[in-house]
Image (spheres, rainbow, N blue to C red):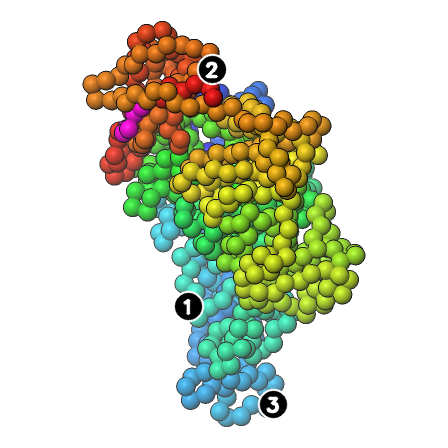
Amino acid sequence: MPFWFWNDKIDEAELVRQIDDFHKKGIDGLVIHPRMGFDVDGGYLGEEYFRLIGVCLEAMKKRRMLLVLYDEGMYPSGSAHGMVAGSNPLYAARCLYARPTGSYTLADGEEAEMRMALHFTDDGLLDDVITDTDKVPASYQWYDFILGFTGGTIRGLSPEEEDGAPCAPLAADLLNPEATERFTNITHDAYFRHFGADFGSTIIGFFTDEPSLAGRCAKMHGKISWTYDFHEAFGEAGGDPLMLASLLFPAKDKRVAKDAQYVYQTALRRRLAKSYYGTLSEWCLKHGVALMGHPASSHDIGLCRTFDVPGQDLVWRMVEPGTELTSPDSVLAKCSADTARHKGVSRNSCECFGVCGSADNPWDFTCADMLWYIHFLMARGVNLLFPHAFYYSLRTPLQSNERPPDVGPGNIWWSEYRTIANYCKRLCWLNYTNTNNPDFAVLTAEDNIPVSSVRYLYENGWSFNYLTMDELNDIAHIHDGKLRIDRYTYDTLLVDSRLRLDAETVTTIGRFVTEGGKMVRASDFSDYVKKHGKKTSYFDHQTAALRFVHLTKSGYPFFLLINEGDDEIDGNLVTNIAGAAHRFDAFTGKTTPVCAAMHPDGFAYPVHIGPREAVILGMDTDALPKLGDTPTFAPIEIVALGENRHSFAYTPAADRRCTLRFAEIHDRVDVTVNGKPAGVLLWKPWEMDITDLLTEGENTVSWQITGSMANTYGKPMAVGVSGVTVEIADKQ
């Protein structure tokens, strides 16, 4: 369900034309996203805007497409394009700061929340706080703690409303439930008034996008996000006056400062979950739609639970090839997937591809790059994609330079997008309503997910699910030395030694261990796994780049093997599961049988995985394995093409196959064989079977090359091909 950027003067006929085009390309749903350049009479949420939404709704209903409503005029969400703060200035994003008593003048809307006497060392470090006005030594100084405004904004819909611009819309106070209520009044209620009859059918949800507490461009030096009565939430989380003051002043005791941050972040997360996400979730539940989208941080796994469809955000090359196991943001896909698993919901999502071009050339984003990201997400369990984005217009630099690239109609792969869309659907189907047969549970905080300690698990084909402390304490059932959550059972809990455990979690882990469960605490889980881990299914030539995923879907086992590297991988899937194996081609939907050899651990199935390729094997456990050698083809002739040679002689024969290969392509090649279209190459492996297009005698091959859209909207890129060969092979 791609974001559809409304980023220009909107025309009714053009909307319908694009929807029809999307549908023909295999798109089953859209997220309508007002974006920079948006131009509709009456503006965002005006009557003309709703009329045009209605036009789209009717066009989509005719094509049985689904609609998700983006809840903001640009982003981040929660401010209704500044209308929340516009309706009441006190609803703007708030902060807390301190000033010496009697040294300041309050600005409009500010108020002194509390007063404390602070003591500082000779080095200027805070070491004590007194709140009792009757017992204050002369060496202490009174400070007022003032509830002010962050001045933060959101990105607006015109260049005059861009980050840092004077007219940028004010961000709302997301910690204030009244402000969020006003947000739903302005936005959600308005949509429901116009289209309520389609809620729960064509309109399936609202997308809320990385809500920001302070807003963008906020000047927060010496300030912290705060709101009315938040001191009570801070106290309930374990905070005291000294901790509060240490959030604003350097503290002598580093432990106090660390504890203060922990308590403060806990209070923020709890409050935000209730005041913002909870308010939206309740509204969506009442109106028959789902809350979708994602929180602000990749590690916000606790906040993910507030979504009906837990989601995350893969943009800005936060993860890229080579960093998929080391980037702090590499947890984001499992964050949403594992949340959904433990919540017992079937869907989880990821906004993806936004600004994933090269750092100095944002339009330098190939279809092969996009495929790598798709595989990254699928290996970790994502089953709903929100591609960022399809652009309504690329008419001027205002559109083409705003968070590119266009991954839809404005790119070189658009004519082949139905193939891409169907490929994604089949992979998402595989990850839908399944279990991933985890070997371990890995404990996380609500906003701190282990990265380095699980690297060995990924690199060696072990399956695990992240489990939050709140899930462990609140919804996990402990019985007979096992943790049970929904469909998942764990007998081993891996705990990163750097993770801070609260008292309740320590108690729960103690009960789990007492009843026979295993808890391993380490900064690297490899030693324990090497000694005690047991596999019933594995890949016998596991490499660091291979992601091995064992799934069970509808009672049948599937194996998803994804090569995140650039080298070929050959080996055998070894399993004790008896069944007839088939290799499933997610591009075509076709299956081919795979023969088995007997193995001490069961059966071995040969598998070749090309660079950045995904391989799916399914097991029909109602049938017996087919023993023997899987048919292979051996080359009998290889012909080099290119330069002045584009033809070769061929003699058709039974069990003969002819493959056209390119060593490298920049970035798209359309192939013609004997004057007939043979297909398009957009990603590795750069090859296609052309057997059925060949005739007896001389055959001609030609190709047309299309370069990256960076050549149109960015910096010039290489265009061309190399190493063109035809391989003629016979079945062995």
Give coordinates of residue 595: x percent, y percent. 58, 28
Left or right? Give the position of 120 relative to 668: right
Name the amino acid type tagged 3: Asp
- Counting other residues with Cα less than 10 Å from the Cα at mark 3, is it few (<14), some (14-19), or many (20 or more)? few
In this rendering, the answer to whether 327 lies above or below 30 is below
Q: Nearer the viewer, residue 389 or 648?
A: 648
Q: Secondary structure at mark 2?
A: loop
Give coordinates of residue 396: x percent, y percent. 30, 34
- The region drawn magenta spans 721-725
Q: Secondary structure at mark 3?
A: loop
Residue furthest to the bottom in view is 138
Tag in front: 2 or 3 = 2
Please name the residue that numbered disc 1 is placed on: 221
Q: Nearer the viewer, residue 668 or 611?
A: 611
Residue furthest to the top in view is 696
State which quadrant residue 91 falls in: bottom right
Q: Main secondary structure of the magenta part?
A: strand
Q: Residue at x 43, y 18 (%)?
A: 730
Q: Residue at x 32, y 47 (%)?
A: 359
Please name the residue that numbered disc 2 is placed on: 655
Question: Can I make out residue 345 in this image?
Answer: yes
Name the amino acid type tagged 1: His
Please name the residue that numbered disc 3 is placed on: 134
Q: Is residue 475 magenta?
A: no
The tag earlier along the polypeptide, 2 or 1, is: 1
Give coordinates of residue 286: x percent, y percent. 69, 42
Q: Nearer the viewer, residue 261 or 631?
A: 631
